[in-house]
Amino acid sequence: MKARLYTKYNNEIRPAMMKDRGYSNVHQVPKLEKVVLNMGVSASLEKSAMDEAVRDLTLISGRKPVVTKSRMAIANFKLRQGQAVGCFVTLRREAMYEFVDRLTSTALPCVRDFRGISPRSFDGRGNYSLGVSDQTIFPEVEIEKVKRQQGLDITFVTSATSDDEARDLLTRLGMPFSAPPATAAAAH
């Protein structure tokens, strides 16, 4: 069975974007290509910190993360070559749409004093990055088993050629962007 958000994209979002933006071909319509979840872990913490990060990221994504290791030793950071420093998961197709649906419908509304996500985190090529400061906003993570608060980076890679197209796509997919701040010139 296809993900609910994927069905919505094919049946509602894609035809609406073709009509609104004047695309002549269905392949011109921007789409979500992949979602990358990344958790960095401080090398100064004990070894169990990496195991907990892998466990939490596995629960959040439904996939086993890849553990990243340092490429070189840096004495000032007490970092050895080959030491585990983080983990990441790349989600595509059904798993990606399931995750985006869970993020927008259950996880982000759990953030305290949530007023929307920043619309300024686009990279200029149609990709969007979002930082989550606490992994416990996801209902899959059991709060009783969490020993330390761990941050998470989420990157949405789209086929859009501009930030405006990507913002339109993500808004239609349900991303709750906050209103852009009013400029001083508009206030006068």
Image (cartoon, helix red, strand yellow):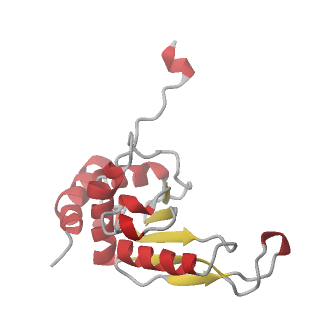
Q: Residue 79: which quarter of the image? A: bottom right
- Name the spot of residue 123 as percent of width and height, x first: 56, 56
Residue at position x 27%, y 47% in the image: 20
Residue at position x 76%, y 85% in the image: 81
Q: Residue 63: which quarter of the image? A: bottom left
Q: Give the number of marks.
A: 0
Residue farthest toward the right in the current orientation of the protein = 75
Residue 75: tell me if it is visible: yes
Q: Nearer the viewer, residue 136 or 114?
A: 136
Q: Nearer the viewer, residue 53 or 7?
A: 53
Instruction: Classify 112 as above or below 90.
Output: above
Residue 173: tell me if it is visible: no
- Name the spot of residue 162 as percent of width and height, x first: 48, 54
Residue at position x 15%, y 79% in the image: 1
Q: Residue 121 vs residue 170: left or right?
A: right
- Name the spot of residue 111 as percent of width and height, x first: 38, 49
- Name the spot of residue 31 as percent of width and height, x first: 35, 65
Q: Residue 74: which quarter of the image? A: bottom right
Residue at position x 46%, y 77% in the image: 89
Residue farthest toward the top in the current orientation of the protein = 188
Q: Residue 26 vs residue 163: left or right?
A: left
Q: Nearer the viewer, residue 67 or 94?
A: 67
Instruction: Classify 49 as above or below 116.
Output: below
